[in-house]
């Protein structure tokens, strides 16, 4: 789908992706924090159920689950934040800029 400037009908359009970048960063940080928190809570619960565990195994499993939980949460949060930011950029924030006439506009829904 080719987009055109509503003012001069040119196809030379630049898309500023400010909200997408901010949404991706905020989503990644929030998702990573939530992933680490959930992984640590699950590890704490798993270790309290068993008998007498090895302290080295506890620390190794806790660190590895926190790292993997943070990575998984960060990736999923980044994806969701970027998608939301893209919708904001396209339809709400007038971040589309015509390179021919300089007109800023929203894309039609």
Image: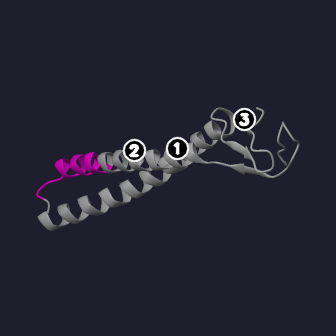
In the image, which is nearer the foreground, mark 2 or mark 3?
3
Element type at marker 3?
Answer: loop
- Residue 81, numbered circle: 1
Q: Which residue is mark 2?
A: 30
Callout 1 touching callout 2 (CB < 8 Å): yes
Distance between the Cα atoms at labels 3 and 1?
20 Å
Residue 93 in the image: state x and y as whole percent. Answer: 62, 35
Give the image's coloring scheme. one colour
Viewer-nearest residue: 58 or 106: 106
Which segment did they paint magenta?
39-52
Question: Along the polypeptide, which appears first: circle 2 or circle 3?
Answer: 2
Which residue does the image show at 12% across and 63% down from the upper left?
A: 55
Q: Residue at x 21, y 49 (%)?
A: 44
Q: Which numbered disc, 1 or 2, marks the residue that appears first in the sequence? A: 2
Q: Nearer the viewer, residue 47 or 89?
A: 89
Looking at the rendered structure, which numbered label has been put on residue 106? 3
Q: Is residue 30 above or below residue 59?
A: above
């Amino acid at each position: 789908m080719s987009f055109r400037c509503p003012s001069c009908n040119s196809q030379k359009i630049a898309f500023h992706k400010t909200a997408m970048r901010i949404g991706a960063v905020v989503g990644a940080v929030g998702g990573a924090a939530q992933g680490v928190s959930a992984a640590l809570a699950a590890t704490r619960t798993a270790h309290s159920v068993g008998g007498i565990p090895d302290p080295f195994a506890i620390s190794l499993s806790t660190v590895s689950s926190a790292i993997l939980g943070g990575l998984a949460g960060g990736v999923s949060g980044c994806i969701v934040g970027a998608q939301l930011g893209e919708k904001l950029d396209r339809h709400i924030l007038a971040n589309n800029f015509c390179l021919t006439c300089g007109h800023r506009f929203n894309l039609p829904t």
